Amino acid sequence: MNDSMMPPDDNEPEQEVFPLEPRYHPIHKLPRKIYDFLASARLAMLLLVTILACCISGVTLWRGAEAGRMVFGTLWFNSILVLLVVNIACCFFGRIWGRRVTLISFGMILFHLCFVTILLGVVYNSLFYFRGNIRLTEGESLASGDPRSYDSFQQGRYFNFSRLKGETTLLKMLSGYKVGAENKRAAYEVQVGEGIDSTKGIIYITHKLSHHGVDYFNDREGYSLLVLLADSQGKELYGGHIPLQSIRQKDGSFTYSTGYREGERVMTDVIPFPNSPEKPLFALQLGYTLSKLNERDGVAHFALFPLDKNGKPLYDKPFAQGNAPIGGRYVAGDYQLAPKEVRYWVGMTVRYEPGNFIVLASLWIGLAGMIITTMGRMLRGRPKPRKGQ
Amino acid sequence: MKPELMLFWIAVGLYGVSTFSFIFGLMARQEKLFTLGLFSALAGFLPHVGVIALRWSATGISPFISISESITLGTFMTVLVFLIIQFSTKKVRPLGVLVMPVAFVLLGWAGTLMKEVASTLAPALQSGWIWVHIVGASAGFASVLIAAGLGLLYLLKERNSGPLYDKLPDLAAIDDLSYRFISGGFILYGLMLVSGCFWSNQVKGNYWNWDAVEVWSLVSWLTYGIYLHLRITFGWRGRKLAWYALIALVAMIVSYWGIPFSVETFHSGFRIEHT
Ligand code: HEM
């Protein structure tokens, strides 16, 4: 070889030695040893095979979240990826230096360079990103720039919440939303920003909303019941929307209850009622069965548990348990509970990922490089068999 | 039997005839059997296209979603490319010795997994990226399968002689052709990966998640990336790479259609929680 770098009209063919070794060394002695190590094609091979082996073990020995913990999320695996990129950079720097640029070598440089820019994109992104989950009931607004508005979030070291200005509002959840003939199932009508500098739109699974570089994706949705609490005289004490989790039954239908998610599983649980910042009077487990006739109608199920002096629920036994239709009321000892209306809550993922653009653009450039190299080879035709081969 | 199923099994049957014609043709050194094999492959290809057309027209939803549909498309691409090669040159007739048995077995396997056509397309799949993605995947598979078939021809020609083998291109040419199909397959798998990243980014705002299907496709891509390095940087040629292409193909089929689909649901992140 190396036919790629060697135009056919070259008078003095280069000596061919495999593996191809770098010909340019910017530094000497010890640093040079390090450089040679980093720029060796053998290291490249070793790294590629290692990564391949890690990938295979990450989908056979371990799976899913465990694979993330054992392989893909670990420092050592990611260090190998970084080493790969450094290796590519050194290899190419050393080999390409001073050579003629042909269609083939140009494509190859592009291709390998894109690995380097992907890494740069990933690193840049990791410093500035924001990823949060925000949950809203129809009609509700939360301050976008307040960390407390998010159920959970992660951020890069240099992300600043002041980037998230104004409010996030869920105007309406639209079920069975159609675009042309396509059924998008769930779509959320949302508004983000402040005043005239706000963006309103409908998001569904393949369609996000962007506002000043921050993207909103739909994630999950469920029912939320507005429950009013009154004392035995009927005097209103409190009212609040209570989001419910959907729980798939064996027969494929769903029930809805207060609770939380743990990975793919949904656990039923109680919530303090009234909710903070009010002082809770008891712990409430709320369930809901949909009416078959009307989407936003049905029966609410209540179970009330006492609290100990620290405010922790005593799960052993509810002190009251009963049902009420939406619009009706349930009398539980000294309290009256009235399920007023059914709304939807939705969970959205909020993402600010300024580095993704670099990564995604690099992918196309890399692919283009690969195509250019191959085209170059096709144009050159099949190499004539050489002596000794 | 429904016409769709009937066509499907006719296609499988004709690919079976083609398979045995090619294999016996090679063993008996009878080139006439190769011709029979080629024409039964063509005859099987027509009902194969018919099945896809029928499924597609039944609901208007692209029938490339479930695992059996995915395999049906992969074999469709393979046989298509195979037929194009065979009708544009007479030099590589015995290529069918590897290509047709694989197409036969895979399509038969797809038949056992076949389900009714989906009546709706899940919202996450309603994306233009799906086209780039499945064309990349199926054409990539076709390319590397043809490359492996050429690898097999290389190994056969290296060991045998006779009129059958004399008609084949010389060893270096087979080697080079096989390499070109690997390059093509590598690009097409690259296209599949890139479009997958964009698709995922469109749906979740996240281009890579190390989920099983993603990692398996990275595995096949890296496998062929290593092939290219062995060739370009380490100067491997001929026999060693022919073996590599054959072994990589087996790994590909198992990993791509066997393992990820049997243990995890298709791109598990794309489900929606609520009805
Ligand atoms: C460890 C990192 C890597 C290094 C050091 C490296 C190095 C090289 C070198 C030296 C060449 C030959 C250039 C020449 O002709 O002088 C090459 C070619 C190539 N590499 Fe890499 N590479 C790396 C990673 C990758 C990866 C991850 C892939 C993709 C899976 C890849 C795919 C290719 C391809 C497709 C070619 C050209 C093949 C052709 O010309 O048809 N490389 N690489």
Image (cartoon, coloured by chain):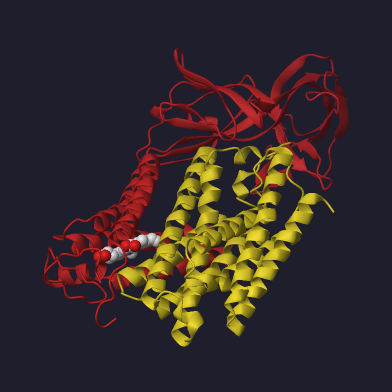
Q: Quadrant of the N terminus of chain B?
A: bottom right
Nearer to the camera, B86 or A102:
B86
Image-based side of A163 in relation to B105, left or right:
left
Q: Position of residue B35 (x, y in %)?
A: 60, 70
Q: Position of residue B186 (x, y in %)?
A: 43, 59
Image-based side of A7 in relation to A178, left or right:
left
Nearer to the camera, A275 or B143:
B143
How many marks the image carries: the answer is 0
Q: Is residue A267 above or below residue A51?
A: above
Q: Is residue A356 above or below residue B142?
A: above
Image-based side of B225 in relation to A290, left or right:
left
For the point 66% across and 44% down, which residue is it?
Answer: A261
For the point 31% across and 71% down, which residue is it?
Answer: A43
Q: Quadrant of the C terminus of chain B?
A: top right
Nearer to the camera, A104 or A328:
A104
Place residue A296 in its image quadrant: top right
Q: Position of residue B191 (x, y in %)?
A: 45, 50
Chain coloured yellow: which letter? B
Image-based side of B262 in relation to A229, left or right:
left
For the point 67% across and 60% down, which residue is it?
Answer: B44
For the point 41% across and 79% down, which residue is it?
Answer: B240
- Residue A231 visible in the displayed image: yes
Place residue B74 in its image quadrant: bottom right
Nearer to the camera, B97 or A291:
B97
Colour chain A appears in: red
Q: Position of residue A129 (x, y in %)?
A: 41, 39
- Residue A115 visible in the displayed image: no
